[in-house]
Image (tube, rainbow, N blue to C red):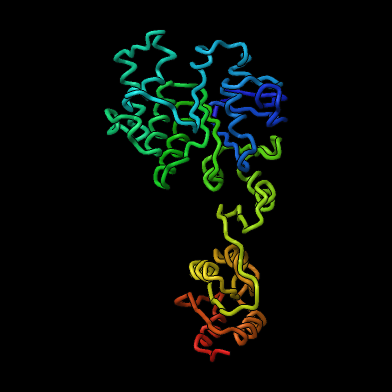
Amino acid sequence: MSGTIALSAAKLSAGYGQKVVVSGIELTVRPGEVLTLIGPNGAGKSTVLKTIAAQLSPVSGTIWVNGTDLCKMKPDQAARHISALFTQQIRTDRMTCADVAGTGRYPYTGRLGILSAQDREIVTQAMALTGVSDLADRDFSCISDGQRQCVMLARAIAQQPEILILDEPATFLDISRKLMLLTLVRSLARQRNIAVIQSLHEIDLAQKFSDRVLCVSGGQAQRCGTPEEVFQSSYITDLYGITDGSYDALLGTAEAAGVKGEPEVFVIGGGGSGIPVYRQLQRQGIPFAAGVIHENDIDFPVASALAAVLVTEKAFEPVSAEAVSRAKEIIRTCKRVICCPESFGTMNQRCAELAEMVNYPAR
């Protein structure tokens, strides 16, 4: 990433008229960097993006684009620096997808909006990048929401911006398209030295595809830093007010709330083998116990979130006789024992004793 600054904001308050929606915005984005805004619905992420895209005037504070006050730029001048994709649907009248993508060249075509051969080549390349070349001659109003999103991204890319602003770009897309789009955005940032500012609802993807993350909640711009600094389980839980479940920042996964009560089933897990069973029992509303799980095992975070009772062992230590004894006590109170691993290794060899109780008489 470049050491220069593409866009910065200081003491910025974003809103409508004089009504402040988000205050305390301090940010700096460099060429080649991806900054992602996260936060609960209605927090004001879109309002912030519209403000730094010059679609809304700041309530207070200043935005600089390459050292120039954005508010002092003419619209056509700003459009040569900034390209934006927002979630609202655009209205078209018998426009093909290529026509829509071609509007990204308007900042360069003059008042008549006539595309040159070079402009058309740029549009063609942008549509190829976003995987919508086959839609070029299709009516924009007759394609799916996900396809429209990709065409609109092609439009934004065709504008050849220095700063690309994306409001929930993964909305409407299936998982394959989400990954394709976010990989493309990151590649564009690196290869074309574009500063990207986006918002995402998919916080697991924000964690994986961002260089820095800005959190917005309660009318304030809050924590800003690298994904490693921002994504801590307790902070994400507070940021989103999670009460019906949990979020594990290490794995980037959300889990439903576990079923409370006396365990009816004991699950012998480990090495990821127990995870599908834990989730199935949770969906069925059956309280269960699990063990013996090492604290560094991939099963551990899911079992911790979903099991009514969990028997654990310290990381890198062999399963102890005490842990096995505790697990046996719980098994004797359960109706059923499920053994998920097909075999046991050196560190969890004692769990084989628990596997012998799979046919233990139901109480």
Residue at 65% in and 53% down: 242
- Residue 128 in picture, x, y percent from top left: 32, 31
Residue 47, relative to residue 210: is it above or below? above
Residue 172, relative to residue 10: is it above or below? below
Residue 192 in view in this figure:
yes
Q: How many marks?
A: 0
Residue 85, relative to residue 75: is it above or below? below
- Residue 180 in picture, x, y percent from top left: 41, 41
Residue 142: quarter of image: top left
- Residue 235 in picture, x, y percent from top left: 69, 49
Residue at 63% in and 27% down: 28
In the rendered structure, the answer to whether residue 95 lies left or right of residue 76 reads left
Residue at 57% in and 79% down: 266
In the rendered structure, the answer to whether residue 26 lies left or right of residue 274 reads right
Residue 92: quarter of image: top left
Residue 313 in view in this figure:
no
Screen quadrant of the N terminus: top right
Q: Nearer the viewer, residue 229 or 129?
A: 129
Screen quadrant of the C terminus: bottom right
- Residue 189 in picture, x, y percent from top left: 48, 30
Q: Residue furthest bottom?
A: 361
Residue 173, relative to residue 301: is it above or below? above
